Amino acid sequence: MCYNCGCQNPQDDMGDKNNITEQTFEYLSKEWNKSLKDTKLTVYELLKKQFEGCNKEAKKEDPSLAEMFERAARAWRQDLTEAKKNTYEILKEQIGK
């Protein structure tokens, strides 16, 4: 379905373009002028700080990233933390950390 639902199928938006998919990261890559790998690593590092007890050190989220998570959470009717946590877990697996 998507990164935010946790089903481990990041190519399928399940009919709602607000779910976070591989295409979402491709779009962010272009917006941030980074490679896809670097974009995923950036998002992963931001989420890692939130979920591994480093909130005090976490950078303020890019507004486009914050909006992405808010739309994804609404699309799947989940809370924001759940959308971020599921995305973090998939990115963690992809990045291998």
Image (spheres, helix red, strand yellow):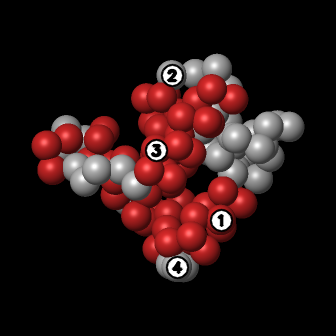
- Residue 35, position as x, y percentages in the image: 54, 79
- Local packing at callout 3 (Cα closer than 10 Å; few below 14, some 14-19, many 20+) is some
Q: CA distance from mark 3 to mark 1?
A: 15 Å
Q: Which residue is mark 1?
A: 27
Q: Which residue is mark 4?
A: 33
The answer to the question of whether label 2 and label 3 lie on touching residues, with beta carbons closer than 8 A, is no
- Residue 66, position as x, y percentages in the image: 46, 44
Q: Which label's residue is closer to the chain start, 2 or 4?
A: 4
Q: Residue at x 40, y 55 (%)?
A: 62
- Residue 52, position as x, y percentages in the image: 25, 41
Image: 3 above or below 91: above
Q: Which residue is mark 3?
A: 66
Give amino acid for label 3.
Ala
Give amino acid for label 2.
Asp
**In this rendering, would 13 be left or right of 89?**
right
Give amino acid for label 4.
Asn
For the N terminus, which image quadrant?
top right
Q: CA distance from mark 2 to mark 4?
A: 29 Å
Q: CA distance from mark 1 to mark 2?
A: 23 Å
Determine whether the residue tagged by mark 3 lies in a helix, strand or loop.
helix
Q: Which residue is mark 2?
A: 79
Q: Which label's residue is closer to the chain start, 3 or 1?
A: 1
The answer to the question of whether label 2 and label 4 lie on touching residues, with beta carbons closer than 8 A, is no
For the C terminus, which image quadrant?
bottom left
- Local packing at callout 4 (Cα closer than 10 Å; few below 14, some 14-19, many 20+) is few
Taking the view exactly as shown, the residue that stands out farthest to the front is: 63
Q: Residue at x 70, y 41 (%)?
A: 18
